[in-house]
Image (tube, helix red, strand yellow):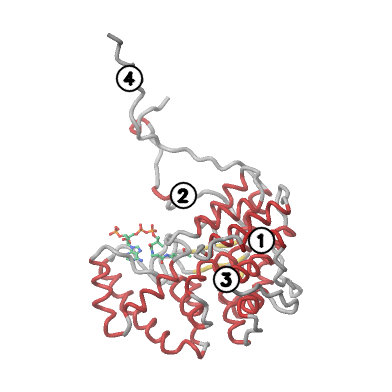
């Protein structure tokens, strides 16, 4: 029996860093070599030759299909009522989580989760976020257009205007890149919830909660703020040094797994460079990135800190003029494909996820007795 920390000889890795916590056939995140494969296909090729709908089907079924025809679904009345009842200042992540929760109450998803449920949730998410974004601006939601894919359909429902080809393509590329990323915190949360035989809506609600944290999905908004504060390339060096001296982190840099340049950042940088609308902002971003990488390498010679996906996510989302406070929730709607694929995989060979913890509290002792009455 062990009752003090020193009695337990097993190694402990804070944040579970480096710990193998499961097996997956969905994606390979090769941090040392900066590779990301979805079911064997490199992310760069998927961005160039795929669409989010095909990639989502690939994640759910393992098959590459040319037929994937997912389009945004109408928001069911009770989900819309729930969105209408939210305070105007609600965090958009909370709005998506509320929509998923209400969808779960209406549809009572089964256990084990299946691809049909995954499709339904992934097709609802863009419509729900667009509806909330309009409602908070005092506008009525827009009905989905059946001929548009999920990224283009999201923009259409947000603005009541069919997006131009370049914006639709850029957002679709972002959706592909954001769809899946191994055992990140939100996906792990989804798998833990699924492992209890809870339903896929509950798993996605938990995942959204995990993604909401600034260390995970909140970074692109911070990247925009960071670049606004820096303002011009000449100010980059001083601003970065001062921020690091204050103990702050540079948003859009560093990653738990990648020690090489994040392949998603590379793919999105290419997309951003192809978008005419981002030129000035992108030039600043590229310059700040160069300076940041040099300073981070000088300050952390033993810990490679490279650009992560969020840095160029900010460039792409800025290029299509998405309001920065919608960035994390846009990430959440794109990640629905990965979360639900992991829920299906977890359920396929399920074992309750319940790790051990090292106890660091007092050794066994007696509760103080009440003082004797006099
Ligand atoms: N800026 C400055 N220093 C950093 C940064 C950064 N962005 N990231 C890590 N470091 C430093 C840490 O201060 C620490 O230094 P120390 O050893 O002197 O204390 C060292 O590098 C190691 O950092 P850890 O916290 O151990 O790294 P961890 O793997 O836990 O962190 C994380 C990964 C959370 C992404 C981190 O790099 C970070 O906070 N980055 C900024 C936020 C960000 O961009 N998040 C998006 C991540 S991508 C995604 O979630 C989709």
> In the image, is the residue at mark 2 within 8 Å of ligand 1 by its beta carbon?
no
Of marks 1 and 2, the one in the foreground: 1
Which residue occupies the foreground of this view, 45 or 220?
Answer: 220
Image disc number at residue 368: 4
Which residue occupies the foreground of this view, 275 or 39?
Answer: 275
Q: Mark 1 points at which residue?
A: 81
Q: Position of residue 265 (x, y in %)?
A: 47, 74
Work out whether mark 3 precedes mark 4 in sequence or the reverse, and give the earlier one.
3
Work out whether mark 2 precedes mark 3 in sequence or the reverse, and give the earlier one.
2
At a point 28% along the width and 73% down the height, the residue shown is 240
CA neighbours of label 1 inside 10 A, class few (<14), some (14 to 19), many (20+): few
Ligand 1's image quarter is bottom left
Image disc number at residue 133: 3
Quadrant that contains the N terminus = top left
Q: Distance between the residues labelled 1 and 3?
A: 14 Å
Which residue occupies the foreground of this view, 222 or 175?
Answer: 222
Q: Distance between the residues labelled 3 and 4?
A: 55 Å
Q: Distance between the residues labelled 2 and 4?
A: 40 Å
Q: Where is residue 78 in the image (x, y as percent from the top left)?
A: 70, 59
SS at badge 1: helix
Of marks 2 and 3, the one in the foreground: 3
Q: Mark 2 points at which residue?
A: 19
Q: Is residue 361 left or right of residue 134?
A: left
Q: Distance between the residues labelled 4 and 1?
A: 53 Å
At a point 52% along the width and 87% down the height, the residue shown is 275
Q: Note whether 140 is above or below 248 in the view shown.
A: below
Q: Residue 62 sits in which quadrant?
A: bottom right
Q: Residue 350 sits in which quadrant?
A: top right
Q: Are marks 3 and 4 in contact (CB under 8 Å)?
A: no
> In the image, is the residue at mark 4 within 8 Å of ligand 1 by its beta carbon?
no
């Amino acid at each position: 029996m062990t009752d003090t920390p020193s009695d337990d000889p097993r190694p402990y890795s804070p944040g579970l860093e480096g710990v193998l916590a499961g097996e997956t056939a969905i994606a390979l995140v090769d941090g040392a070599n900066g590779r990301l494969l979805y079911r064997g296909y490199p992310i760069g090729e998927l961005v160039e030759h795929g669409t989010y709908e095909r990639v989502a089907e690939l994640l759910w079924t393992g098959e590459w299909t040319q037929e994937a025809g997912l389009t945004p679904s109408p928001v069911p009345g009770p989900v819309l009522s729930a969105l209408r009842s939210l305070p105007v200042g609600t965090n958009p992540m909370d709005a998506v989580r509320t929509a998923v929760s209400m969808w779960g109450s209406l549809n009572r998803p089964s256990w084990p989760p299946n691809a049909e449920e995954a499709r339904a949730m992934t097709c609802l998410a863009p419509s729900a976020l667009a509806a909330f974004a309009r409602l908070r601006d005092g506008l009525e939601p827009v009905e989905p257009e059946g001929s548009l894919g999920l990224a283009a359909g999201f923009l259409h429902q947000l603005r009541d205007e069919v997006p131009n080809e370049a914006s639709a393509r850029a957002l679709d590329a972002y959706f592909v890149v954001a769809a899946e990323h191994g055992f990140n915190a939100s996906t792990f949360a989804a798998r833990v919830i699924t492992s209890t035989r809870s339903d896929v809506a509950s798993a996605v609600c938990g995942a959204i909660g995990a993604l909401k944290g600034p260390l995970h999905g909140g970074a692109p908004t911070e990247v925009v703020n960071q670049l606004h504060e820096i303002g011009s390339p000449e100010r980059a060096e001083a601003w970065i040094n001062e921020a690091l001296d204050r103990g702050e982190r540079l948003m859009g840099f560093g990653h738990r797994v990648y020690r090489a340049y994040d392949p998603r950042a590379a793919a999105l940088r290419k997309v951003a460079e192809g978008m005419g609308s981002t030129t000035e902002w992108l030039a600043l971003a590229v310059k700040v990135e160069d300076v940041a990488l040099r300073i981070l390498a000088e300050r952390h010679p033993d810990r490679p800190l490279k650009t992560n996906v969020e840095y160029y996510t900010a460039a792409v989302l800025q290029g299509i003029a998405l309001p920065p406070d919608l960035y994390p929730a846009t990430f959440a709607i794109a990640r629905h494909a990965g979360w639900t694929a992991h829920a299906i995989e977890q359920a396929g060979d399920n074992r309750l996820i319940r790790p051990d913890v090292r106890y660091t509290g007092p050794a066994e002792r007696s509760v103080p007795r009440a003082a004797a009455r006099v």
